[in-house]
Image (spheres, helix red, strand yellow):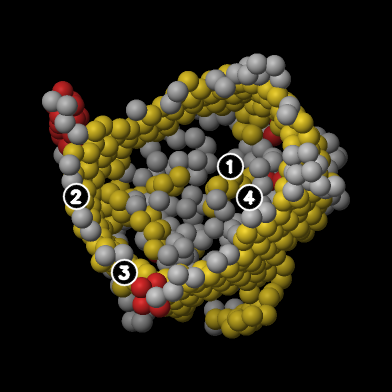
Amino acid sequence: MKKILFFFFLFAIVFTQAQNLGHLSGGYESYAQYYQNDSPTNFTAPNDAFRSMHYLNTSYNYKQFSFGLQYESYLPQAFLGYSPDLKGNGLATYFVKYQKDNLSVTAGYFYEQFGSGLVFRAWEDRQLGINNAIKGIKIKYNFNDLAEITALTGNQRIGFRVSESTIYGANADFNLNKLIQSDKLQLKSGFSYVARYQETTSQNPDLKPVIGNYSSRINLTAGGFYTDFEYVYKNSDARASNNVLLDQVLFDGNAWLWNVGYSQRGLGINATFRRLENIQMYSERLLEGNFYNTGVMNFVPGLTKQHDFSLANIYVYQAQPGISFGEEKVGEIGGQVDMFFTFKRKTALGGRYGTKVALNFSSWHGLNARFDHAKQIYRADFFKPGELYFQDINMEIRKKWTKNLKTVFSFIDVKYNKPKLEFEGEFVHADIVVADFEFKLTGKRSARVELQHLNTKDDMKNWAAGLFEYNFNHHFNVYAGDMYNYGNNDKKIHYFNVGTTYTQSSTRLSLSYGRQRGGLLCVGGVCRYVPSSKGVTASISLTF
């Protein structure tokens, strides 16, 4: 049926394009890796050392209708570190959408987010291997900008199959400005309900097939000041570990999120507080705790600064929303403060071109809780923090010195509770210094030099890193970099990488060769584990 739909869709596109009807767009991405044995990291290449992943998506718009599909291929297998559910090839997603005036109806696969995503988010991120689209139907209606109502139901995508459970939910966003009749204030509120229906053979009569998440939120903006608050509650549910259902005791969950900030020209400050307790939701109970984010129904990112430099991403924080009696963890509590300000041009600190400074502080603790392991129950304090999981204090200075020279200097102090976060090793306290120089040369040529150092007496000890990048023009560049764990007396390893990229219009080609350090790869605060490896990587992406 999927193949028939795929070829019918392509035929319809060709026919309507020939008749000059509607608009066609899409894209293609292809990634390939060839692995090699690597004795320094004890990496043994798999038997199928060559692996590739391909994504072809097209969408077609005609009047009030939109059609789309995505074809995916993972042959002979997906890259190491990706979910084993991503295998083979076939039509992965497709949709039909009708939109006229204030009404929108989508059938097939779709993405959606309610509020901040704490209660529900369906999205795609290929770098993380995430595509948890919902296959079903979604209806959205806008009541003259006063309110927008969304209702949906379906099954979540898991590889090339869909979840055994059914997901349904509703969301309402209200614009209250017309009610308060103020030009200086903007007031919005929202409410959400998302449920999972999954049959169960549990002997616990309190375990219901329907588990719901509820969210309420409010947002206020007044001039440069803004604040928003969201509360999420999760019905009591069983836990799961290593594909085993733990249903003797059921636990509910909750999340509290508060943002407040102020911004004006040249100055901005934002503070975030969040408390999570057993709030992670999966489309199937037994998927809980998997390493691939498979079946995740909500969006729970780590709220810390997303650093751009390699050594600053060795010790990264991943949110801790779940329960583990073995590790005595039931969630997290903490916050983050960001401050940005600019020293004006032609001042003592601003110089000729001005200076931009960013300060960031984040601190995350486990919930302070008391555990009864015999009864498998716990009691957690609300505000009192428990053991420190992660802390990051950093400053970044961006400055343009001349027409041809820009610099970025970063200073980072990080504390990382590796035993609690990775279940091994020791507590780490590290200091990281980064200097980034960008040179504009003659013509369209430019160069960038990046120098980094991580200093610590803990874990794998000191690191040094460097990167040189040369741009021949806006289309073609080459680069070479290395991360060297020179302080590790047990095994000093160079994690080198050399490569090139070529960009022309909407087409981008890349080729690289090097050694991959094992650890967490995070995008937008969501992470997946990447194993150590060595080999060649190539990619191509284009849009039309």
Give the Cα distance between marks 3 and 4: 35 Å
Spot occupied by residue 150 in the image (x, y as percentages of width and height): 28, 64
Q: Which mark sits nearer the N-terminus, 1 or 4?
A: 4
Q: Nearer the viewer, residue 292 or 175?
A: 175
> Which residue does the image show at 39% across and 72% down from the upper left?
177
> Which residue does the image show at 25% across and 43% down from the upper left?
94
Q: Which mark sits nearer the N-terminus, 4 or 2?
A: 2
Callouts 4 and 2 close, C-beta under 8 Å: no
Image position of 280 (left or right of 431): left
> Which residue does the image show at 51% across and 22% down from the upper left?
503
* Residue tagged 1: 530
Spot occupied by residue 430 in the image (x, y as percentages of width and height): 80, 52
Secondary-structure class at tag 3: loop
Q: Tag on residue 306?
A: 4
- Tell me if residue 515 comes above or below residue 143 in the rendering: above
* Residue tagged 2: 98
Q: Can I make out residue 20 in this image?
A: yes
Q: Alpha-carbon neighbours of circle 4 within 10 Å: few (<14), some, or many (≥20)?
A: some
Q: Where is the N terminus found, in terms of image quarters?
A: top left
Q: In this rendering, which labeled residue sits more in front, label 4 or label 2? A: 2
Callouts 2 and 1 close, C-beta under 8 Å: no
Q: In this rendering, which labeled residue sits more in front, label 1 or label 4? A: 4
